[in-house]
Image: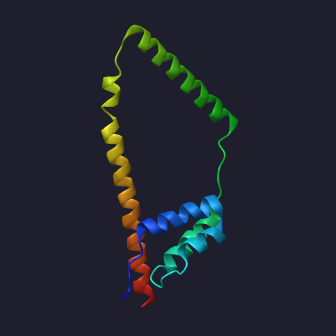
Amino acid sequence: MAQEPSSDRLEQYSRILILAGPAKARLYVSPILPEEESLFKTIDALWQNMRRVEPDNDFKEQLHQQLMEEARRDVARQHLGISKEARRSRTPWLASAAALGAAATLAGAFAYWRWSSRQAA
């Protein structure tokens, strides 16, 4: 009976590949199930072709200035006794959006896997 690939296994493989390299990642997933093979090949191809991009110095400086300005505002709010409750109300929406994005990514990977397995048949 064929097993469906675990999204946790794919995610863990990707993390190990990025942090420890292909040899450690292969040890983690050994053996690769036949129905997982195309997904792992796709992850490998992405890892080999995608390159990290370092932000330029202007962006870093601007970000630093914005963060320092926000920190000064926070200190001023604390001294004045102004509560940040109104700003925290956005947090649940952010968490929901992140969860939705993760679900969409997994759905896309699953759809690709299903499509590629049908193409092979």
Q: Is residue 37 above or below residue 12?
A: below
Pick the residue in front: 53 or 71. Answer: 71
- Who's the residue at 43% across and 65% down the image? 8
Q: Is residue 66 above or below residue 35?
A: above
- Who's the residue at 38% across and 86% down the image? 2
Q: Is residue 79 above or below residue 92?
A: above
Q: Quadrant of residue 110 in the image? A: bottom left
Q: Quadrant of residue 61 in the image? A: top right
* Number of numbered markers: 0
Q: Quadrant of residue 93 in the image? A: top left
Q: Is residue 23 above or below residue 96?
A: below
Pick the residue in front: 19 or 101. Answer: 19
Residue 56 horizontal side relative to residue 28, left or right = right
In which quadrant of the rendered image does the C terminus lie? bottom left
Pick the residue in front: 23 or 14. Answer: 23
Quick one: which residue is furthest to the top in this view?
80
- Who's the residue at 60% across and 74% down the image? 26
| Place of residue 52 in the rendered image (x, y in percent of width and height, measured from the top left) | 64, 53
| Place of residue 106 in the rendered image (x, y in percent of width and height, measured from the top left) | 39, 64
In which quadrant of the rendered image does the N terminus lie? bottom left
| Place of residue 32 in the rendered image (x, y in percent of width and height, measured from the top left) | 52, 80
Q: How is the image coloured?
A: rainbow
- Who's the residue at 33% across and 34% down the image? 90
| Place of residue 48 in the rendered image (x, y in percent of width and height, measured from the top left) | 65, 67
